[in-house]
Amino acid sequence: MVRNQTPGSVRIRTDGGDEWRYDAIEKAATFYDCNRSNAVAFACEDVDTLVRAARHVLEWDDLAREQRREIAETLSIRAVTFDVDTSITVTRKGGE
């Protein structure tokens, strides 16, 4: 019999310089109009979907190189940057 490996709860530290995390979670809860736990899960799932969608848009054939660069710059955030060269690359910053 296989036991579920999912923990009953997960803590997110908000001390020691990580106080900003609480505000971020609150913003997500407001955005998704749900509790903090669901907001964190929704945001985590949406990141992958949004990055894939952004990459897809940047690969459209009918975009000029300058349009691609502007879109890449607009969509780049703290943890993910989009660079346009002859190919589209996505870089994840940090390891957290």
Image: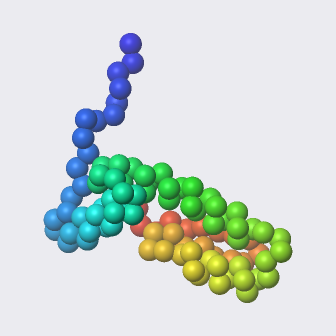
Tally the numbered discs: 0
Answer yes or no: is residue 70 visible. yes
Look at the image and tell me in which quarter the C terminus lies: bottom left
Residue extending farthest to the left is: 15
Image spot of residue 71 (x, y percent): 64, 79
Q: How is the image coloured?
A: rainbow
Residue at x-position 33% and y-position 59% = 29
Answer yes or no: is residue 96 visible. no
Residue at x-position 40% and y-position 58% = 32
Image spot of residue 35 (x, y percent): 29, 52
Specify the quadrant of the image occupied by residue 7: top left
Image spot of residue 51 (x, y percent): 58, 62
Residue at x-position 24% and y-position 64% = 22
**Where 2 falls versus 11 (above or below)?**
above
Look at the image and tell me in which quarter the N terminus lies: top left
Q: Nearer the viewer, residue 65 or 95?
A: 65
Give the side of residue 32 with respect to residue 65, left or right. left
Residue extending farthest to the bottom is: 66
Residue at x-position 70% and y-position 63% = 56
Q: Nearer the viewer, residue 39 or 44?
A: 39
**Where 11 falls versus 4 (above or below)?**
below
Residue extending farthest to the right is: 62
Give the side of residue 39 with respect to residue 68, left or right. left
Image spot of residue 79 (x, y percent): 45, 69
Residue extending farthest to the front is: 33
Give the side of residue 7 with respect to residue 41, left or right. left
